[in-house]
Image (spheres, rainbow, N blue to C red):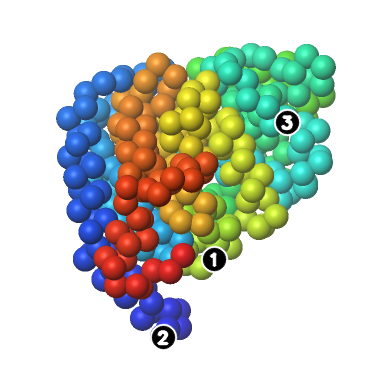
Amino acid sequence: MSNFGELQSLANSITAVTSPFRNYLNDLYEKYRSLNEGAVADYIPELALAKPEWFGVCVVTTEGQVFEVGDCDQLFTIQSISKAFVFGLALEDHGRDYVNSKVSVEPTGEAFNSIVLDEVTNRPYNPMVNAGAIATADLIKGKNGTERLKRMLEMFKRYTGRDHDINVPVFLSEKATGYRNRAMAYLMLNFGMVSEKIDETLDLYFQQCSIMVNARDLAMLSATLANGGVNPVTKQRAIDERYVQDVISVMLTCGMYDASGEWCYRVGLPAKSGVGGGITAIAPGKVGIGTFSPPLDVKGNSVRGIKVCEDLSQDFGLHLFNVAKPERNLQEWIAGGDGINDW
Ligand code: DON
């Protein structure tokens, strides 16, 4: 890193310590810490081990400041959040037209694991539901499963700035119990939507769901997209800038499963959730938000995570379609009025 880079990151971290936004985030954490609604996912025993009280919130700005509160070091499996980023890798591997010939970008309005394909084209509806995610994983290039997984892990590292491991017990359980996903894969093979390497691709899909992340990683993932595909801290490009809008737009329309419409209405931020309890949300050009809290609502989205994102969006006018003057100006709250930030 250059001297200038070091000085800038020092300035940023000082801002992160003194900024009023830090107090705001602490208050937000306290506000929802005792919210005891929802249920931890238990379709495999490993996920049921998650503690319902785990709660972390991290916000990373496109200038690389990191604000966090709570359990931001606690690792958990990324689950469906991986789908958005693997979609980006498939786009880089094949381009928009080919990917779109195998996976549509239409919201389903149905549960994430529904066994449904477009009746006319036989494509899965979008890359965020399981069928579409399996078809997307099928597109990831590599000479074998090991190389394809390695490419995925390298991609996540570009976004988060650190190495990621697979939670092997979660992977093995997903693999052992994933009959429904297997059925979807064979249905899609029947229609020529996926290649014949079904077992390898399903393993890859189960492995991508089992990648270990924390709330800070989730904020880095979304901050990188918010920053045009470049990690705002490491300055490394994670995804070709041509495909950033593809990923973000599908997150907006399909990222929160059959709650995507209500999420868009109430929060208005492109986002993706996972049954591990994570949510990653993007305020383009401004911040990435990562939340972690395992109890889920009936649609599979983290209850505390939804509340935190709703408040952040409302309080700082982050909703994509907000045209009213926000109650609080995010730039000022983060900078503490010292003018360091200039979006
Ligand atoms: O494919 C599965 O069943 C899970 N690994 C899906 C993960 C997920 O997060 C779905 N949604 N909430």
Q: Earlier in the sequence, mark 3 or mark 1?
A: 3
Q: Is ligand 1 closer than 8 angstroms to the Cβ of mark 1?
A: no
Q: Which residue is mark 1?
A: 236
Along the horizontal axis of the image, is 148 left or right of 233? right
Cα–Cα span, label 3 and label 1: 28 Å
Q: Amino acid at mark 2?
A: Asn
Percent x, y of residue 217:
41, 50
Q: The residue tagged with tag 3: helix, strand or loop?
A: loop
* Furthest residue in direction bottom, as rendered: 3
Against 65, is 258 above or below? above
Q: Amino acid at mark 1?
A: Gln
Along the horizontal axis of the image, is 299 left or right of 139? left
Identified at 41% across, 59% down, the residue is 61
Percent x, y of residue 341:
39, 69
Q: Quadrant of the N terminus?
A: bottom left
Q: Which residue is mark 3?
A: 103
- In contact (CB < 8 Å): disc 3 and disc 2: no
Q: Which residue is mark 2?
A: 3
Percent x, y of residue 194:
76, 28
Specify the label residue 112 is tagged with.
none
Q: Amino acid at mark 3?
A: Val
Identified at 39% across, 56% down, the residue is 60
Along the horizontal axis of the image, is 118 left or right of 338? right
Cα–Cα span, label 3 and label 2: 45 Å
Q: The residue tagged with tag 2: helix, strand or loop?
A: helix
Identified at 41% across, 26% down, the residue is 301
